[in-house]
Amino acid sequence: MSSEFDLIKRYFTRTAPDGYLGVGDDCALLPIPSGRSLVTSTDLLLEGRHFLSDIDPFLLGHKTLAVNVSDLAAMGAVPAGSLLGLAVPDVDHAWLQAFSEGFHAFAEACGCPLIGGDTTRSVDGIVISVTVMGHVDPKTVLRRDAAVPGDDIWVTGELGAPDVALALLQGRLPHDAQLLAATRPALEAPQPPWRFAQRLGGVGHAALDISDGLAQDLGHILRASGCGATVYYAKLPIHPGVASLAPSVQHHAVLAGGDVYQLCFTAPSSQRERLHTMANEEGVRLARVGVTTTEPGLRILDDNGKQIILESAGFDHFGDRA
């Protein structure tokens, strides 16, 4: 029989980096470089709501931290540390081993060590909460309210695959093993461009991570900044596995599909060459997809210049899934 403290020591305790006080005390300590501001964010992941019960626990450990580091990336912040709250209905050592290995592997890759948290027994299903901390230069931090009319709109990575994979797994699309194999990694092992994001300060204006759908999330920037936008569908970086689907399915996946964890940001046109250079150096796919405008609202135009109308702009935690 394993106690709570045995589980913490066995699966979630690692040697803290120099200057840190990690797992094992009432609170953790982490250093913040002089002249930088602390950045923090927290997320909940619920079994059956944010991940399927049969997900590989190693990939779940990775995703658990990755979706939070994506929030740091949206601010242009450098990851510094994380806290993990984990509630499980039973002690499954094989599951805990794989989950913790996935979490620690991504933590080591992006420099966001686990320095504290809590574990407990849940009544029903797995509940995961992660808080991440980072630091950023307050003079160049990326915010949602900083876009100005005439900015280029950029998107990193690819769109559509996570939504298609989820639809296949839930039976909302006909079974297609080849398409699922092509899209499932984007759903279960997102790769936020955290290195690229750290270089955006002073280059980009406004930014956020795409978690609930491009149309909805870009709308947050537009409302906060008091401007509108025109986006050209043909310029969007669409995952190859999505491109062959029926237009209505494709439009929903690309424009309203969540779980992307890539960046949408705005920047002045004078920064185009610099941004392409940065993306090439960091191995990030980068697409210029539109422009911000003085006219309010978001207009997404197809190849013929006709506006694409969506039934839903994205995911709402207190509504039906889009």
Image (cartoon, helix red, strand yellow):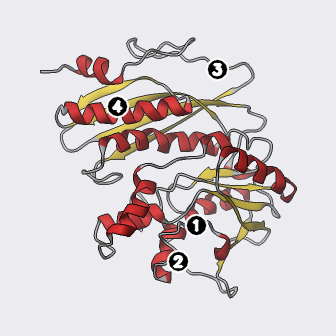
User: Looking at the image, is mark 2 or mark 1 earlier in the sequence?
Assistant: 1
Q: Residue furthest front?
A: 178
Residue at (79, 46) in percent of width and height? 203
- The CA span between labels 4 and 2 is 39 Å
Q: Secondary structure at mark 3?
A: loop
Q: Secondary structure at mark 4?
A: helix
- The CA span between labels 1 and 4 is 34 Å
Q: Nearer the viewer, mark 1 or mark 4?
A: 4
The percent position of residue 34, horizontal first and vertical second, equals 72, 18
Residue at the spot of label 2: 310
Amino acid, disc 4? Ser
Q: Crowding near pointer 4: few (<14 within 10 Å), some, many (20+)?
A: many
Q: Crowding near pointer 1: few (<14 within 10 Å), some, many (20+)?
A: many
Amino acid, disc 2? Leu
Residue at the spot of label 4: 100
Q: Secondary structure at mark 1?
A: helix
Residue at the spot of label 3: 32
Amino acid, disc 1? Ala
Amino acid, disc 3? Ile
Q: Is residue 213 left or right of residue 236?
A: left
The percent position of residue 286, horizontal first and vertical second, equals 68, 57
